[in-house]
Amino acid sequence: MSDHAGTHVDAPKHFGPGGKSIDLMPLEDFYTSAFCLDLSHVELKASISVSEMEDALSKSGEEIRQGDTVLLYFAFNKRVSFDDPRWQHDFPGLSPEAVHWLADKGCKIFGVEAISPAPEGELNFQAHNICGERGITHIEGLDNLEAVVGKGRFQFIGFPLKIREGSGGPMRAVAVFDQ
């Protein structure tokens, strides 16, 4: 079984030598307060800027608190089906500056629908390295984010499989609302 299949979280080990493997990451990192930002308007292959992130955050009425999980709804899975070759290449994602912005705000983990957190190529490589440098990580391959976008805060639960020395771990992501 791949440690980077389906919905999964990247462990710091994935970002470079010396990073923690998935089995050494604290479980409390995966049981957090969370909310979902609406970035469904972004174009395929787009690199999302800090100003676009700030605008989405403002429209959400939320604020990023220390240790939050921030999910990012790109409507990618609604626009490109899994069997379409574009699914592996044409996803939007964060600019390097936007990854830094999330870390500066206190976000511990962010999650995306696509197979990577940033557009394919150099930007994706940079996003992964920034996560390693900043001590944050990301979840890839989320689905059904349309069910949580615009709904306010919820409890995020997404425990990864405990794979010894794994550079990532498949997880089942769950949102629990108070109501």
Image (cartoon, rainbow, N blue to C red):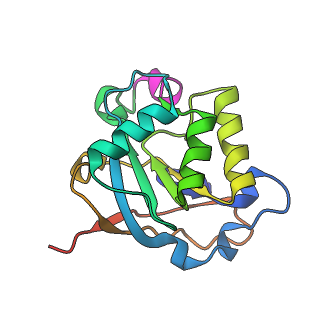
Q: Is residue 3 left or right of residue 85?
A: right
Q: Residue 53 in the image: x percent, y percent?
A: 44, 39
Is residue 88 in the magenta section? yes
Look at 69% across and 55% down and name the residue there: 134
Q: Is residue 144 left or right of residue 136?
A: left
Q: Would you place residue 155 above or below residue 52 in this image? A: below
Q: Residue 40 in the image: x percent, y percent?
A: 31, 33
Look at 54% across and 60% down and name the residue there: 106
Q: Would you place residue 57 above or below residue 171 in this image? A: above
Is residue 10 in the magenta section? no
Looking at the image, which is closer to me, 119 or 67? 67
Looking at the image, which is closer to me, 116 or 6? 116
* Image mark count: 0
Quadrant position of the N terminus in the picture: bottom right
Residue at far right of view: 17
* Span shown in magenta: 84-91
Q: Residue 136 in the image: x percent, y percent?
A: 63, 58
